[in-house]
Amino acid sequence: MGISNLIAAAALCLSIISFFKSNKSNKVAKEWEIHKENVRKKEVDEQIFHSKNNSRISLIPSFHLSFNEKIFIKNIANEEHFILPISLINLGRESATNIRLELMTQNGGLEDYFKTGRLKENIHFIHEYLDKQYAFPGETVKFSACCKKHDKAHDVFFKIKFKDLVGRTYEQEFRFQYCHKITNNFSMNHTSNLPVCIEDDDKTANSFSII
């Protein structure tokens, strides 16, 4: 094979190698651009989700534990019981309706609206039920729990269910703590979880029609 043929063959090989490298480089560049676009779309979707979620949370009814009264002792059926006055203030920007306490457990037919720490059996029960089933923004709903007198510290859990003005249903869980042996005040260590929408049944969605 002559020198000119060798040079031509070498040039052809280099051209083929360059072609494949160029194609590979273009493929990598396209994959990188697709990846960047997917990341951008994901970030936009997350921003939209958080924006809608934050807006929704700021507008829905939302309750917070408030302890304006102290724990006191009352004689019930010749036994001393603690009476635990509990208040829930609506800090949301919308009114709540159909407010009710929800069952935490149902043990052998006994309806337990409270769960006491890690105890298998509940020791807290309703003394006085909710004083009303609605709350405008800034209004307070009150009820009380009771249990037999004891000298232990307990975490007590309960939850409520309510609706907003357009028919969506929410659940919200709470936890409070007390130790009457130390003080007849509730502990500052308490929790008011964010409401969770469990039924998004907007009654106004189909209330308007085009004539």
Image (cartoon, rainbow, N blue to C red):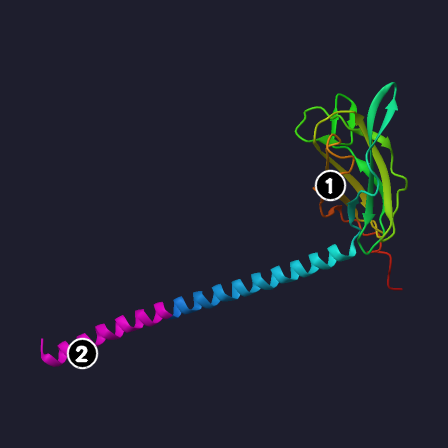
| Residue drawn 9% across the image and 78% down it | 2
User: Where is residue 211 drawn, in percent x and y?
Assistant: 89, 64
Give the amino acid at mark 2: Ala
Task: State which region is magenta.
Answer: 1-25
Q: Is residue 74 left or right of residue 109?
A: right
- Quadrant placement of the N terminus: bottom left
Give the amino acid at mark 1: Glu
* Quarter holding residue 68: top right
* Quarter holding residue 57: bottom right
Judging by the rendered image, the residue that carries numbered circle 2 is 8
Judging by the rendered image, the residue that carries numbered circle 1 is 173
Callout 1: few (<14), some (14-19), or many (20+) C-alpha neighbours within 10 Å?
Answer: some
Chief SS of the magenta region = helix
- Reply above or below: 73 against 161: above
Please name whichever residue, 115 or 148, is drawn nearer the observer in this view of the structure: 148
Residue at the extreme bottom: 4
Please name whichever residue, 52 or 23, is drawn nearer the observer in this view of the structure: 52
Q: Nearer the viewer, mark 1 or mark 2?
A: 1
- Reply above or below: 38 against 136: below
| Residue drawn 88% across the image and 42% down it | 133
Separation of marks 1 and 2 at Cα, in angstroms: 80 Å
- Circle 1 SS class: strand
Residue at the extreme front: 182
User: Where is residue 62 drawn, in percent x and y?
Assistant: 78, 50
Residue 23 magenta: yes
Q: Is residue 89 left or right of residue 56?
A: right
* Quarter holding residue 118: top right
Between disc 1 and disc 2, whose residue precedes? 2
- Circle 2 SS class: helix
